Image (cartoon, rainbow, N blue to C red):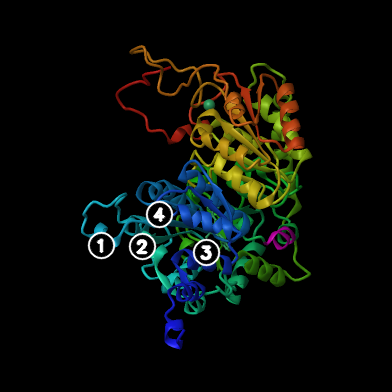
Amino acid sequence: MSALAKRIDPVESEAAEQRELTDGFHLVIDALKLNGVKTVYNVPGIPITDLGRMMQAEGIRVLSFRHEQNAGYAASIAGYLTKRPGICLTVSAPGFLNGLTALAHATTNCFPMILISGSSEREVVDLQQGDYEEMDQLAVAKTMCKAAFRVLHAADIGIGVARAIRAAVSGRPGGVYLDLPAKLFGQVMDATAGEKSLVKVIDPAPAQIPAPEAVKRALEVLKSAKKPLIILGKGAAYAQADEQIRTFVEKSGSPFLPMSMAKGLLPDTHPQCAGAARSTVLKESDVVLLIGARLNWLLSHGKGKSWGEPHSKKLIQIDIEPKEMDSNVEIAAPLVGDIGSCVSALLEGMGNKWTPAPAEWLNAVKTKREENVAKMAPRLMNNNSPMDYHGALGVLRTIIKERPDAILVNEGANTLDLARGVIDMYRPRKRIDVGTWGIMGIGMGYSIAAAVETRNPVLAIEGDSAFGFSGMEIETICRYNLPVCVVVFNNDGIYRGTDRNSAGSDPATTVFVKGARYDRMIEAFGGVGVNATSPDELRRAVNEAMDSGKPTLINAVIDPAAGSESGRIGNLNPQSAIRKKPTQ
Ligand code: ADP
Ligand code: MG
């Protein structure tokens, strides 16, 4: 055979090409792996089915969900728990839109997340010629996230992934959309050039050091306080500066108030914790230091009666986002930087001679707190059947005390508001809940990601309505055999199960099937289902589930008359000026 013939031998040249070429699929996977992505939350379908398969084959853990919104919530909380972007992978148009709710949620909550969606062909979408699942996804996503990118050429995949990662975790973390059109995956390029095109993101979330004058100003304001208060938000929990924060709070001698997801950063049983004296400290404090907490609706925007107005307070705020300052009220001492650096700088500035806050103030707070705790105690010990919220939560409170490393997922109305107050947390980032929007639907997605990312047991305390938004994912929990125990607080409906429709035979808008047995749903997938009608039964069932680590769903039968409308935020419901409430 001549040399020329050898060179063009079809079989050999194909083999040579295969060795030297790569494509969009592999470049996406290589780019993610290069940047340490180990887990992807996914719902397969056109055009990303093979991408998921190949990721799995290449050693990425790919968890397939039943609905994109739940995969998205999982990715968002994975971002919060790990400080690395959680990755959600979806199909085009409808799958993308389902995931988008979670991406907007991640952005609102300042969680780093990347939503990667396959999309239809640009040429067809832009001429609106009616492609399969046609949608200008990039344009839609832009309004709902921190940044959005589209990659059209295989050679740009490395840059696209790098930009997405950096945008998600740097500064104030948030959601990023990455649009990958179907055609990109099959694009072929030289393997060596492909490898060179990948980017390893160096220092994706650089420390942001506060200005020395700002630190000095903050300390001066803090020093002037007679009744200081430190409010810890989920930004403080996210920052993973647990030791510095604890040392700072203790050195300050100030009471601290943890926002919902900051509970456990210092234990709720800490002598300085003002969780059970919330209204007193908000009203009476004279200087308030916010650490990774925004003055949004959850803090009454920092004003009004609950903040003791017309008396004015001075505020110090630590946040990585400069625009957060003065968002609702004047901030006397803005401290812009990452929480770890800011708190360290404050500690340094305090030196060894810092005088802690006056003891009378802390003692007054302590007295108030003990009073409130004592008032609640007997209610938590009742063994009523059907259960009321306090009886059921009293049991779960003890279980978390005995198992402080378990992750508590919590959503609902009454189930959320009461559990937040009743259940003490002892370790950082162990309570994850509805967050800034107060949304329902995070339950099973959060539970799955918490179990996968931390390998700790998960206890999900769910209102029956809240559970319904993601309930199908109990199949996912069973499929991956995750140590998740779901307790559904079943009171036959939304807020209460007792509403009646006075105008017809349809059920009232807020009620569900009476006596529903949610426990039987998980049995369909091989999990453990338990019907618990008393606190004693509930205690036994949860302990068993936490010991065994088997996927479990407990239907906790709650008195349908026990709840109140919208839990603790009924005041946010608008009232009709001309009609009384039609159902009672
Ligand atoms: P909460 O609801 O618990 O009060 P928010 O979500 O309102 O908490 O506030 C969190 C704040 O933390 C946001 O303003 C965000 O910019 C800030 N933040 C998040 N991560 C960091 C960080 N590493 N350093 C400083 N601030 C941060
Ligand atoms: Mg309910």
Question: Where in the figure is residue 258, as x and y percent of width and height?
Answer: 64, 48
Looking at the rendered structure, which numbered label has been put on residue 183? 2
Q: Is the Cβ of the residue at disc 3 closer than 8 Å to that at disc 2?
A: no
- Give the residue at x 37% y 33%: 574
Query: To which quarter of the image does residue 155 belong?
Result: bottom left
Q: Amino acid at mark 1?
A: Glu
Q: Which mark is residue 123?
A: 1
The secondary structure making up most of the magenta span is: helix
Q: Earlier in the sequence, mark 4 or mark 3?
A: 3
Number of other residues with Cα within 10 Å of mark 4, as a class: few under 14, some 14 to 19, many 20 or more? some
Q: Which segment is the magenta one?
A: 241-247
Question: Is 341 in the magenta?
Answer: no
Q: Amino acid at mark 2?
A: Lys
Name which residue lies at 75% across and 63% down: 355
Residue 246 within the magenta-colored segment of the rendering: yes
**Mark earlier in primary sequence (4, 1):** 4
Nearest the viewer among 206 and 99 is 99
For label 4, being within 8 Å of ligand 1 is answered: no
Which residue is pictured at 77% across the width and 36% down the height?
547
Q: Is residue 517 above or below residue 334?
A: above
What is the three-letter code of the residue carrying label 4?
A: Pro
- On the image, the x and y values in percent for residue 503 come to 33, 13
As drawn, the label of residue 29 is 3
Q: Which residue is mark 4?
A: 47
- In this rendering, does residue 138 appear at all? yes
